[in-house]
Every structure is written in structure tokens, then in C-alpha cells.
Amino acid sequence: MGKQKKVWSAEQKLTIVLSVLKEHSSVSEVAREHGVAESLIHKWKTQFLDHGKSAFKHGNAKTPDKALEAENEQLKKVLGQKVLEIEILKKLTSF
């Protein structure tokens, strides 16, 4: 059987990246210490610098953008209903 892929938590990735960024150790030293490929550490470092800690988070948690989009859709439905109600009331009062 092949080697099983290790899953790193956001906290573990953050610790590894910060140890490299703080220049306590070189990438190769940190890679040996944690059993991680140097290329993977460079990838995590790039992700961290581009996106911060949120780059390492996974799961089904809604991001603020998705939550706002869901709220926006719900408000559009309510607005559509209210517009329809207003149109119906205008027609009823015109009789």
C-alpha cells in the first residue's frame, strides 16, 4: 500500500510558516523537523502571505461573503413580495 497523506491543521501550518517567517530556522530545517516537504512549506508561506490564516481553513462554515449573499437573496424575495402586494393594492383601490 502507498503512503497515507498527512493532513495538517490550520494551526500546525501557521506554526510552521511563522517559524520560517520569523527566521528562527531555515525552510529545510523546519521541513526536516516536521516531516514536511520544503515545497509544501513554500506553498503554505505563499498562501499565508496572500490570505493570512483563513487560507488554511477548511469546512462548511459560511464565509462572511456567503452569509451576506444568502441574506441578500432572502431580502430580494421579501422585496419582491412587497412589490407584488403593492401592485395588488393599487389595482384594488382603482375599482
Image (cartoon, rainbow, N blue to C red):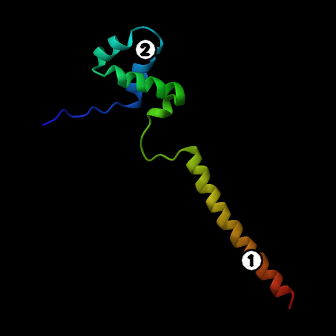
Residue farthest to the right, as pictured: 94
- The vertical placement of 19 against 8, above or below, is above
- The vertical placement of 36 against 90, above or below, is above
The secondary structure type at the circle numbered 2 is helix
How many angstroms separate mark 1 from mark 2 (CA)?
Answer: 61 Å
Amino acid on which the number 1 mark rests in the picture: Glu
Identify the residue under disc 2: 20
Mark 2, Cα crowd under 10 Å, few <14 / some 14-19 / many 20+, is many
The secondary structure type at the circle numbered 1 is helix
Residue farthest to the top, as pictured: 24
Image quarter of the N terminus: top left
Residue at 30 percent across and 19 percent down: it is 34
Amino acid on which the number 2 mark rests in the picture: Val
Q: Quadrant of residue 59?
A: top left
Q: Position of residue 79 (x, y in %)?
A: 71, 66
Q: Position of residue 45 (x, y in %)?
A: 45, 23
Image quarter of the C terminus: bottom right
For residue 53, side relative to residue 85 (left or right): left
Q: Position of residue 30 (x, y in %)?
A: 34, 14
User: How many numbered tags mark residues here?
Assistant: 2
Of the pair 94 and 45, the residue shown nearer to us: 45
Q: Quadrant of residue 44?
A: top left
- Sequence-wise first label, 1 or 2: 2
Residue farthest to the front, as pictured: 39
Residue at 21 percent across and 34 percent down: it is 4
- The vertical placement of 32 against 75, above or below, is above
Identify the residue under disc 1: 85
Residue at 58 percent across and 44 percent down: it is 64
Residue at 36 percent across and 25 percent down: it is 40
Mark 1, Cα crowd under 10 Å, few <14 / some 14-19 / many 20+, is few
- The vertical placement of 63 against 92, above or below, is above
